Amino acid sequence: MAYSSKLLERAVEQFSTLPGIGRKSALRMALYMLRQPRENVELFASSLVSLANNVKHCKVCNMVSDEDRCPVCQDPRRNHSLICVVESARDVLSIENTQIYNGLYHVLGGIISPMDGVGPSDLTIAELEKRIEDGGVKEVVMALSTGMEGETTAYFLYNRLKKYDIKITTIARGVAFGDDLEYTDELTLAKSIENRQPFKF
């Protein structure tokens, strides 16, 4: 596609790097931004720069946070003996939207995927073990995607954690095999957490 402006072309290229955004959608977004008041565009741009420069990861659970410890880990009303292990920050947000879970989280930062070059050492598994070794944890809930890679990760975690005196459970299979948590409706996800089962392999 020929562009009348190099600046427009550059903006389209950047928008098209977003997940699920093709060149046509990227062009539509860039042209939309051109129609907005300058202050709105500057606010949009500054929020992205601020996100890149200032966002942190919770030192306890690895969740995206504005502070060293996220609001969930700081909340004394949460059940600190219960940890839900998830793949990403998106999964935490999905589970929080159910308003049914009151424990803490541990964000692995991915799942084991040899095809993508992701091994156990690339995830925050050691940090999870450290939290358990520090004491106070009574149950770990595996809430990973139900595809082959998620199952492999859960199995690996189970083998690492079974030596500890804790209960290891997994979400019930209201979530179909192969589904990602972020695409699961809130009611199904809530029931899957409520009806969690002992981990089996």
Image: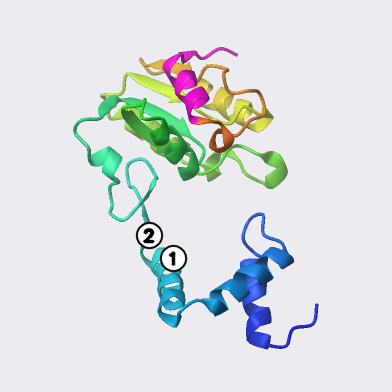
Name the residue tied to disc 2.
Answer: 55
The residue that appears at 63% across and 27% down in the rendered structure is 152
Query: In the image shown, does 164 or 5 lie closer to the viewer?
Result: 5
| Tag 1: amino acid | Ala
The residue that appears at 61% across and 68% down in the rendered structure is 29
> How many discs mark residues in the rendered view?
2
Q: Label 2's element?
A: loop
Q: Position of residue 4 (x, y in %)?
A: 72, 88
Task: Look at the image and tell me in which quarter the C terminus lies.
Answer: top right
The residue that appears at 65% across and 32% down in the rendered structure is 149
Tell me how far mark 2 sits from mark 1, CA to CA.
6 Å
Say whether residue 186 is left or right of residue 82.
Answer: right
Q: Position of residue 37 (x, y in %)?
A: 45, 79
Name the residue tied to disc 1.
Answer: 52
Q: Residues within 10 Å of mark 1 (few under 14, many from 20)?
A: few
State whether residue 82 is above or below residue 113: above
Q: Position of residue 62 (x, y in %)?
A: 39, 45
For the residues bearing labels 2 and 1, Cβ distance under 8 angstroms: yes
The residue that appears at 62% across and 60% down in the rendered structure is 18
Residue interval drawn in magenta:
186-201
